Image (spheres, rainbow, N blue to C red):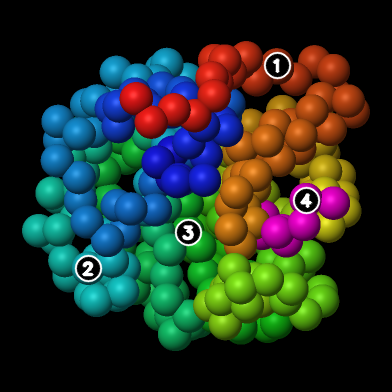
Amino acid sequence: MWTHKSWQGRFLAHPLAAQERLRAYAGWCTAVEGNTTFYATPARETVASWARQTEPGFRFVLKLPRAVTHDHRLAGGDTDLHAFLDAIEPLGPRAHALWIQLPATFGPTDVPALARFLGGLPTSHRYAVEVRHPAFFDDPGAVGMLERTLTRFDAEWVSFDTTAFFRTQPASDAEREAWSRKPRTPLRTRALTDRPIVRYLGRDDPTRTVEGWRPLLDVVSGWLREGRSPTVFVHTPDNADAPALARRFHDEVRARLPGVAPLPEPAPVGPATLF
């Protein structure tokens, strides 16, 4: 994500070597989603470079490979899983959670497969599960079954809040594309562990994004008062202003809870140049 084209020259210096962009991003935000690991497991040396560019407290939430979660639906894919776990080992404590995003067809009848999978994972990592089947949001029995399973293995339920995005019709090409791909999922306010994770999808209009995250401010502030350590990712369909929006969300939380540590100061970004 730190290589996002529209950030070059705005949030990250340009030109900037690829192996330095994460270091620059880490001056804006202290956590990142590892979405690319869903499609391909990076080389171990690549991951080692990520570790060199970040402080030990930086948080990576890394998605398990598609082969494991979607192709094999957690019942197989051991070779891909072991290759992934070996590749991310250089991150050490930066691997905040391993993100198990499940397909929308993975429903309540599949929860026993999830339990078996979680039970076979190494305890050296923390795990967070994202589900998209409608029953996990509409059926209290399904919700309770999944919560009990995750609690048994000290795994978190990732909340993907798209309520603000789907409140009104899309108004840009990026929003129209996201409209057809993103799930309609509510904000989840119940944390199962001391490290809840929220993914928030706003709109390309920053004002509407800020308006939409108001309920989330209450939730995150409440978790912090309880002594939890939440991680929040702020997205928009085009993600053009995501780093600045994430910092604004953090500032609004700090306005309520001044004891929350400030984010680092970003490195200065000079004017774009061709040379």
- The answer to whether residue 231 is visible is yes
Q: Residue at x 44, y 38 (%)?
A: 2
Amino acid type indicated by mark 3: Val
Residue type at the position of mark 4: Pro
Does label 1 or label 4 sit earlier along the sequence? 4
Q: Residue at x 70, y 16 (%)?
A: 261
C-alpha gap between disc 2 and disc 1: 38 Å
- Left or right? Give the position of 239 relative to 59: right
Residue 133 found in image quarter: bottom right
Give whichever of 230, 9 is nearer the camera.
9
The reply to whether discs 3 and 1 touch (Cβ–Cβ < 8 Å) is no
Q: Which residue carries the number 2 mark?
A: 67
Q: Which residue is mark 3?
A: 129
Which percent across, then down, holds residue 164? 78, 65
Decide: is 108 above or below 265: below
Q: Amino acid at mark 1?
A: Ala
Whole-angstrom CA distance, mark 3 to mark 4, is 28 Å
Q: Residues within 10 Å of mark 1 (few under 14, many from 20)?
A: few
Residue placed under numbered mark 1 in the picture: 261
Which disc is residue 206 wearing?
4
